Amino acid sequence: MSDRIEVLKTYKTYVGGKFPRSESDRTYKITDPKGKQIANACRCTRKDVRDAVVAARSAFNEWSNRSAYNRGQILYRIAEMLEDRKDQFVKELEKSGTKSKEAMKQVEASIDRIIYFAGWTDKLSQVFGTVNPVASPHFNFSSPDATGVAGIIAPDEAPLLSAVSLIAPVLSGGNTCILLASEKNPLPLVSFGEVIHASDVPGGVVNILTGHHSEMVDHLSAHMDVNAVFNTTAEKETRKLIDENASISVKRVTHYPETDWFNEKHENPYLILEFMETKTTWHPVGN
Amino acid sequence: MNAVTIPDFHQTIPIDKVGVEERMARLNKRSIKKESKLQGLKLALSMIDLTTLEGKDSEGKIIQLCNKARTPYTPMPDLPTVAAVCVYPNLVDAAKKALRGTTIKVASVAAAFPSGMARLKDKLEDTRYAIDQGADEIDMVISRGEFLKGNYSYIFDEIAAIKEACGEVHLKVILETGELETYENVRKASDIAMYAGADFIKTSTGKIQPAATQPVTMIMLEAIRDFYRNTGQMVGMKPAGGIRKAKEALQYLVLVKETLGAAWLTPQWFRIGASSLTNDLLMQIVKQETGVYQSINYFSND
Amino acid sequence: MSEQTQEKSTDESANGSPKPTSPNADLKLDFASFWEYSEAPESSDHVEITERYDHFINGDFVKPAKGRYMKSVNPATEEVFTEFAEGTSEDVDSAVRAARRAYEKKWSRLSGKERGKYLFRLARMIQERSRELAITESMDGGKPIRESRDVDVPLAAAHFFYYAGWADKLNYAFPGRTPEPVGVCGQIIPWNFPLLMLAWKIAPALATGNTVVLKPAETTPVTALKFAEICLDAGLPDGVVNIITGAGLTGAEIVNHPDVDKIAFTGSTEVGKIIQRSLAGSEKKYTLELGGKGPNIVFEDAPIDQAVEGIVNAIFFNQGHVCCAGSRLLVQEGVAGRLITKLKERMETLIVGNPLDKNTDIGAINSKSQYDRINNYLEIGVNEGAEIYQSSNTIPEKGFFCRPTLFTGVSQSNRIVQEEIFGPVLTIQTFRTPDEAVEKANNTPYGLASGIWTDKGSKIFKIGRQVRSGVIWSNTFNKFDPTSPFGGYKESGIGSEGGLHGLHPYVKLK
């Protein structure tokens, strides 16, 4: 009996609920800390950004109009799926050099973080919405409303946990997103796309691209149909580029140059609010 | 006249109360000064239906009222007279005699005023009696109980029957808006009255609070405007009850001017049912002419 | 009104009452031929306007470092109203330094309760000087006294009153967090609601413990300088509020000053983008309240007469110089004809003229340049093939006045439908289904305010959720209140002002 040949995974992207290769048909090498190649990842460029934004935009209305309860359940389902595939993610993180214990800690923290934000979907407008006692005979109330399509630029640190910490608040409020996964180690994020796909998240709500950020950030932050940018890059030039690009269409920019992703401070509703507008409705009171 | 389609009165025309009151508040910010004030005061005086509708009314009271109607203020004989006096049917004759030789009309309430709680037969008889006595105008009340029950055809038929009895005599239909309560009801009752043949629509009997209000008058004027556009026919408007001050009277005129325009700014199409308003208008007129604030002691209180 | 019409219309009738001309046979209502309102001007005798205004820095009126002054013109008379200082980098720098000093030495050390008491004082003093402020606003900017008296000034006072109460209650505004002031705030405000926008900016900034450098617009600086006098009268510590006057270059100095911690700007989207760009790479916080092209959607089941009034308030309020104006009327086909007839009738009763006359509904266009801009758009509209309708009322010969204007026969692609005109100019489009209305409403880069008119509550909530804008006025329009947050989606801005939400841009959360 001959040895079984292992089936290797081809890492693709996740766009519009499908797993296409990069439009460029190019890949780049993903290595472990010792420089050994683990796999190839898609080297996405501006056309992939373009397609991902189209997918995110077309998913937006449906996702933001889902009931908060439903969105909460779907986010929770992501956590369930991730818990179910914990071993896979631990292995994937290990491959890229994360120590076993650390990898497990990261996966578990990711699961917990999703659950934290799953719980906020139907509480956000209760805590941050208001009924405003205007002086005229009108009923007036304000509630948070999703901003739209967000571009997320994820860091290399704790690649799964950091990306999850960025996606969850954005999704929780009803936005859709395009994630530029960790450039160094995007593999767990590609797999995370599979988890999302298996969790009743409508196609296009989360789009995951891999590749060199330098080839995508410019196009993503300038794109007229992107409403917000969630940036973790601390690097000054990139930050400035994002800000300048944002001004073309008055995008909301949140710079979040964090490094310690295990810190519980990332579990806070004010992060959700960064991607929410306030909608105030007036109506006369009379008979 | 070409055929007019009568609307389905069970369909409610939406009205937003807050919006109506805001509009009214804005109209009330019009500042009527100088010549326009004097002109408006005189115009209001000419639109008054000088009214007495009390159980204790007598011929003597009517004669005094008619004298006031003829000569509102002796020192200024060139002032306009009021438009009409408004009395109960059994005093129409006395009023006619007292107003002989003037163009002042005699209006009579009829049709079981003020409650309207009687058989149609009796209401028709009441109406014919007032006309026989010489009434130029009839002010009838609608049956509010039937209206609030949703019995709109009853209201329509009753008005139509009384209008038939009136013939050429002008019919004013009193909606008693204080009992209808909502603006939608006021609008509906206005439409029913106009399509059934009313020459005028009128807010109130004066016996129920609130009587005439400005927002209600606005709703009725808007109904008249839509009726005019739909049928080509002008209908008159009469707010009645509770209008005591010259300033309010001017506000009503502004309301008419900016809702229906100049054509309605005449006693032929707009009346104010009132009694004590006359003297307040006179005091303001004299103040405008002389620059001196006035005392009621110098104005005859008939 | 000419003598002739007066004469014709006051023929004596039988009982001596004046008799108007007969109604038009073609069912056109006639609002003009009889009983014209006499002039009712608000007296400006008691309002003191000095010939020249200086900057207000560190509790003193200070001459501009470069000694240059600009002119503010009364747009209703085209005469120079007053002169004011032109701020340069030196002036801005000394104002920022004063604000920083006041922040560190005084204001941030004061308890919330005491800060609040100053704000209450400011609210009261605005009320006390309300007539003077209203008249000044109308003379400097051209808005009708009815609006400056009944809207701008009372709301400005109300804003200070509202935020005064927040000063010692900030811990309740941010669950789970402790708010801290940002520091020195640079604030740049527009010319359409000069004092009110000042209140929107200064009241929340001071309540949260910040100090400010504010620049009013170059066509309407005077009420801000009168507010500076009020700050002195209220005993507000020196440097807490600094007012620098000037035009765009002065604004840029504030935006780019390295020691400013936060920028709050209200104005055009064009300038907003420039500001956002110049803040790129800096740590400054910012809020932007920018332009709009608000859809006002009327369904056939709407209360029509009130909708007509709402449309008038939406587009003709403040000469249409309103970022949240309902400038795009979307009306359901079944009711369009009736509604447009009523709207045209209503427009005939709007009085265009002297801003100080208490009966004026539409005052003067704020400036020559804005007047030219509006007229240019009228030309564009006509050239695009749209049908123009203007009310027939007379307008003064001198001054910048514009008749209320409608465009029908327009389509979504027309420039007059796409671009913010900022004048009394309404475009009218029809729609057939709710989905079509929502699609047209959202088909714009803006998202500030929208109107929805229907008697059906469930439809209001559905459409209100689908329309992407920060304010939804259902069965009403252009209502403002200090407790009610206001802010735009998309290119209409970033962040909210007003209400509890309006505190957020002025704090750091710990």
Image (cartoon, grey):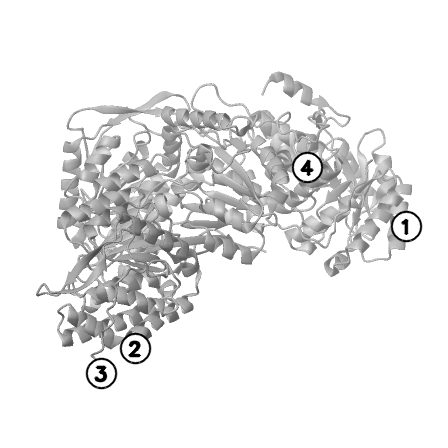
Secondary structure found at label 2: helix
Picture quadrant of residue B263: top right
Mark 2, chain letter?
A: A
- In this picture, residue C309 sits left or right of residue A66: right
Have a look at marks 1 and 3 and say if they share a chain. no
Report crowding for label 2: few under 14, some 14 to 19, many 20 or more residues within 10 A (C-alpha): few
Report crowding for label 1: few under 14, some 14 to 19, many 20 or more residues within 10 A (C-alpha): some
N-term-proximal mark, 2 vs 3: 3
Question: In the rendered view of the protein, which quadrant contains the N terminus of chain C?
Answer: top right
- Residue C129 percent across, percent down from the top left: 35, 38
Camera-side mark, 2 or 4: 2
Tag 4: amino acid: Thr
Mark 4, chain letter?
A: B
- Residue C266 percent across, percent down from the top left: 32, 40
Tag 2: amino acid: Asp
Question: What residue does disc 4 label?
Answer: B278
